Image: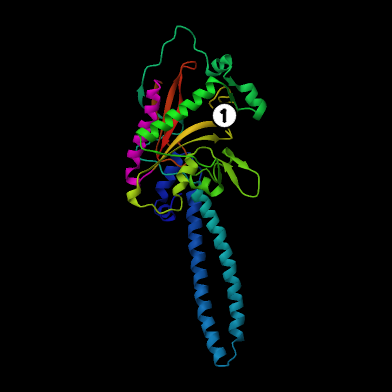
């Protein structure tokens, strides 16, 4: 989240940023809360100083065997007021933290300004879509026809937006996962991990899923708040949470294959067929921890590494820069890589790389 000092010093810039990111967070409310906090803090600190001074005076009077009851009675009222103001400070701090936790990241100057996907900018293309002398089938028709994708049994087992992979589809999935992990570890310098598939609430806060996007997560019932990971970016990034990293250790390059779990809240009626918006899917993730000064260079590197996978598979694709109104909550800049879908005649997002 953004630091308080940065927010205080950049109120007008943040107002413009929030407008361009389609956010309705009220910076004037933050300014008012911050001013109220300083006012209450000043008052409570003054009262605590008075209490300390009077307590010393009471101790002196008692030592001299003099009456201190009037001061003790006065301090009783002061202590009650301090308790009241401390409680008010806690409430104000919670409100300010809520604004901090729900305000999106500041976008990079190179990010296109725009309200939605229509303002995204195409950067480059690779490969030519293959021409067919027949109408290509959709992947769900091919998979069901070959008996290797079973949407009916997936739904029977778990409900809508689940699929059962069988035979060649399961082997293909496993082969692709191994190919990607081997490429990223042996050629691109990443260290492979096997992460937990469940994480604590504070871990989801660490990568911005909570509190703003709780409806997109699957929460487990029990004594503790556990969430199924929406991507291994969450546990991988949080391996350095609350840690001090020596600069000589950077860059830290992490990769993992995990299943990913997403509720797809708000996507009713969109891509209801096929593998596009499943509640569970497999993903190989890349994460780099770098200095802020080199983060844009790292973004370009990771995008090229993701493209190299598609090029090795000879899949025509294009790279899109997302605009301010379309990119993710925690991102300063995002590239989407979209693969050509022959049956639909369009490019569809297959990978996303963000700083």
Mark 1, other Cα within 10 Å: few <14 / some 14–19 / many ≥20: some
Task: Name the residue nearer the viewer: 18 or 180.
Answer: 180
In the figure, 242 relative to 215: above or below?
Answer: below
In the image, which residues are magenta?
289-314
Q: Is residue 286 left or right of residue 75?
A: left
Residue 287: x and y, percent? 42, 40
Foreground residue among 274 and 283: 283
Identify whether 135 is placed above or below 92. above
Question: Outermost residue, right direction?
Answer: 156
Q: Is residue 315 left or right of residue 199?
A: left
Q: Give the residue drawn at x 48%, y 63%.
A: 38
Q: Which residue is mark 1?
A: 278
- Residue furthest out toward the top: 133
Coloring basis for residues: rainbow
The answer, for residue 326, to whether it is visible in the render is no
257 is higher (above) or lower (below) than 41: above
* Residue 293 lies in the magenta stretch: yes
| Residue 250 within the segment the image draws in magenta | no
Q: Is residue 112 above or below residue 346?
A: below
Q: Position of residue 198 (x, y in %)?
A: 56, 42
């Amino acid at each position: 989240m953004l630091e308080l000092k940065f927010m205080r010093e950049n109120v007008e810039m943040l107002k413009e940023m929030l407008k361009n990111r389609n956010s309705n967070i009220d910076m004037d409310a933050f300014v008012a809360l911050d001013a109220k906090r300083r006012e209450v803090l000043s008052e409570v600190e003054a009262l605590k100083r008075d209490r300390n001074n009077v307590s010393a005076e009471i101790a002196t009077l008692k030592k001299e065997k003099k009456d201190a009851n009037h001061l003790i009675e006065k301090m009783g009222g002061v202590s009650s007021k301090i308790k009241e103001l401390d409680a008010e400070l806690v409430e104000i701090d919670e409100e300010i933290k809520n604004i901090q936790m729900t305000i999106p990241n500041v976008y990079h100057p190179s990010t296109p300004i725009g309200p939605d996907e229509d303002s995204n900018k195409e950067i480059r293309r690779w490969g030519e879509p293959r021409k067919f002398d027949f109408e290509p089938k959709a992947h769900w028709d091919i998979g069901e026809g070959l008996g290797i994708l079973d949407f009916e049994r997936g739904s029977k087992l778990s409900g809508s937006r689940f699929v059962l992979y069988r035979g060649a589809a399961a082997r293909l999935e496993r082969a692709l996962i191994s190919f990607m992990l081997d490429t990223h570890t042996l050629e691109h310098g990443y260290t492979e991990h096997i992460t937990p598939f469940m994480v604590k609430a504070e871990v989801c806060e660490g990568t911005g899923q909570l509190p703003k996007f709780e409806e997109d997560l699957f929460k487990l019932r029990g004594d503790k708040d556990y969430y199924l990971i929406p991507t291994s970016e969450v546990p991988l990034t949080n391996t350095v949470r609350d840690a001090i990293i020596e600069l000589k250790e950077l860059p830290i390059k992490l990769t993992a294959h995990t299943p990913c779990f997403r509720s797809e809240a708000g996507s009713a009626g969109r891509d209801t067929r096929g593998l596009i918006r499943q509640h569970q899917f497999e993903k190989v993730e890349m994460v780099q921890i770098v200095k802020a000064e080199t983060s844009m260079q790292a973004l370009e590197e990771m995008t090229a590494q993701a493209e190299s996978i598609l090029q090795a598979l000879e899949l025509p694709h294009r790279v899109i820069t997302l605009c301010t109104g379309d990119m993710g909550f925690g991102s300063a800049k995002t590239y989407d890589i979209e693969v050509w879908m022959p049956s639909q005649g369009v490019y569809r997002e297959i990978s996303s790389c963000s700083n």
